[in-house]
Image (cartoon, helix red, strand yellow):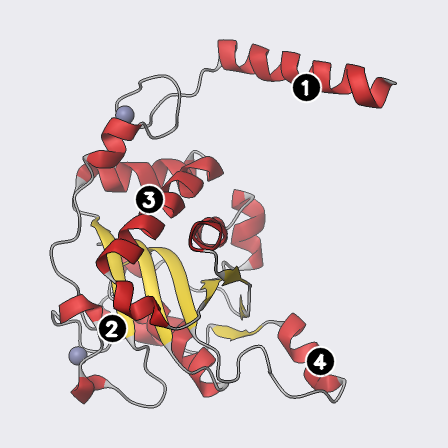
Amino acid sequence: MYQSLIKPLFADIKKFTLNVLFPIRCVVCEKEGLFLCADCQNKLTPLPLQYCVACQKTSPFGLTHPKCISPHTADALVSIFDYHDENVGKIIIAGKYKFIPAIFEILGNLIAKKFVDGYPSILSEPYTLTPIPLHSWRKRWRGFNQAEILSQTIGKELNLLCTTVLVRCHWTMTQKNLKKERRLLNVRNAFALSPKILRPCLAGRQAKSEILNQNFILVDDVCTTGATLAEAARVLKRNGADKVICLTVARD
Ligand SMILES: [Zn+2]
Ligand SMILES: [Zn+2]
């Protein structure tokens, strides 16, 4: 009886009280209702150009230039919004540092729609979404991995599978304050296949079947030079992935 009637009632009262005391407000305009209201969602600046993940020069649709492709390079890098729009930065920073995971659900829905509308040909084959992993310490500190929430939301919106196949195997400095060469060194060997993927291999089943010949969309919140995404893509391709597309909410 308690479980079926009283408990939901208390949950409703708790939600109502929290909403009255701490109403949900848009992190940009402070309007009540959503963490990012529809008006502010519509005003975010799209990234005007896309860039090759390997050479950082502009490239149509973010496709990696044929001259820059090697067996372990990501095939494309697509970022939806311009991080130089101060509101884009404000929203992502609020989500990460004011600990609001719901912001990444809103952003995930938003970028899923823009991704299918702007890049329909990229998705002509089946893809699996996978997030850039956070180091376990950082995930414990934040309580969530924003890239995981983005991947799951995009997966639901586009009806694609979402699975975590990579882990971060060593602590890396924040890329933001590093020069380009240091960024590449900083993330070198930062990722490995998740033990969940490796366990079936140890049991003698087909090695890494979750990676072999599969197409992936690697998801992260912000891309600066693309070094982190390029390194994660390298691990997937080295283990037999077919196509790897990197997708981020914004580019700095
Ligand atoms: Zn707003
Ligand atoms: Zn290039």
Mark in the foreground, 2 or 1: 1
Circle 4 Cα neighbour tier, 10 Å, few/some/many (<14 / 14–19 / ≥20): some
Of the numbered discs 2 and 1, the one sitting upstream in the chain is: 1
Mark 4 element type: helix
Mark in the foreground, 2 or 4: 4
Answer whether residue 109 is visible to the viewer in this image.
yes
Question: In the image, ligand 1 is in what quadrant?
Answer: top left
The answer to the question of whether label 2 and label 4 lie on touching residues, with beta carbons closer than 8 A, is no
Residue that mark 1 sits on: 11
Residue that mark 3 sits on: 110
Residue that mark 2 sits on: 53
Q: Amino acid at mark 4?
A: Pro
* Mark pair 2, 4: CA separation: 32 Å
Residue at (65% x, 79% y) in the render: 198
Q: Is residue 161 above or below residue 75?
A: above
> Residue 55 is drawn in which quadrant?
bottom left
Q: Amino acid at mark 1?
A: Ala
Residue 241 in percent (x, y) is at 46, 82
> Residue 25 is drawn in which quadrant?
top left
Residue that mark 4 sits on: 200
Q: Is mark 2 within 8 Å of ligand 2?
A: yes
The answer to the question of whether label 4 and label 3 lie on touching residues, with beta carbons closer than 8 A, is no
Mark in the foreground, 4 or 3: 3
